[in-house]
Amino acid sequence: MSEEIVKVPTTGIEICHESFGSPGDPPLLLVMGLGTQMIAWPDDFCRDLASRGYRVIRFDNRDTGRSTHLDHLPAPDPVRVMLRREEPPYRIGEMALDALGLLDALGIPSAHVAGASMGGFIAQQMALFAPERLRSLSLVMTSTGSVRVGRPRPGLLLRLGRDRRPGLDRDGAIEFVLEVGRQIGSPAYPADLDYLRELAGRSYDRAYDPAGYLRQVGAIMSQPNRTRQLRSIALPTVVIHGLADPLVAPSGGRAIAAAVPGARFVGLPGMGHDLPRPLWVRIADEISETAAAGERRMSPTGPGRAPGVRSR
């Protein structure tokens, strides 16, 4: 399916999205992270999930890709937002309403939801806002919103932010993505530089918006600690986290798994803050296994065959 754009009436945001698989299969919504477009959910990864019996939907969050860019809103100072001295242009909750509104626009009453990094913040908020709209919850390299857990390695955020500035040309933007990959990638799985270059080039061609990135940073810096609220989630939940993640420490994922009743924590040795190709199948296995549990939970006839189960 080619990319399509729909308008979310509740937030006024236009969302660009793309689907893989049969429209009649159970829907699985993929939510991407900070400043990262939907195409960062790899095509082959999406096709693998679709082959397991799911309608896989990926989309651009606001201020990324071909969704609405809120250019009329100034880019905030992230430190002032964190210190509560400046209001962010919008919050994680509004981004969650975008995602729920996308499901409305597509006529989807409920879906399995998988979120990575900031996308995990959004997915958690979706589950708290509208638990009846989610069939299962898969969270990858993310945290609870508490400043006590999931802390990045000292100095890492400063190094990542110093080159996030307007004025980079296409080659400069690609080099920045490669540098980020070196800083936060998986030590046990060397980066596929050709793939990263191609992805960075496609992303630049679709949209390059450093100010939009900072607006999303503002949403992250202003998010609440969701730990207490997470205890109310009653969904099949898996928390997948790289044990070598330098950007969101594994303590963030462990805190989610401890808060959500019955959640599984899957720690992957040697994985950093990325989706390394050798782990695509393993991550898809965990997401689809959790989604299959959600389908069995919804079945009026009780336990039975569900999509997504693959022998290992």
Image (cartoon, helix red, strand yellow):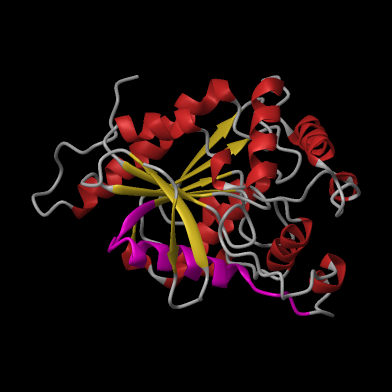
Percent of width and height locating residue 115? 51, 50
The residue shown at (72%, 31%) is 185
Q: Is residue 148 left or right of residue 45?
A: right
Pick whichever, 156 or 1, lies toward us: 1
The answer to which quarter of the image holds residue 8 is: bottom left
The C terminus, quarter of image: top left
Instruction: For residue 188, say whether it is visible.
Output: no
The answer to which quarter of the image holds residue 199 is: top right
Pick whichever, 15 or 267, lies toward us: 15
Percent of width and height locating residue 211? 77, 62
Say if 212 sits above or below 25 in the image: below
Instruction: For residue 74, say whether it is visible.
Output: yes
Q: Does the magenta stretch include residue 145?
A: no
The N terminus, quarter of image: top left
Pick whichever, 141 or 170, lies toward us: 170
Q: In this view, does 292 lie to the left or right of 273?
A: left
Q: In this view, does 18 lie to the left or right of 187?
A: left
Percent of width and height locating residue 187? 73, 24
- Magenta stretch, residue numbers: 87-112
Say if 216 sits above or below 160 in the image: below
Q: Residue lying furthest left in this view?
A: 301
Q: Does the magenta stretch include residue 92?
A: yes
Percent of width and height locating residue 208? 72, 51
Pick whichever, 192 or 19, lies toward us: 19
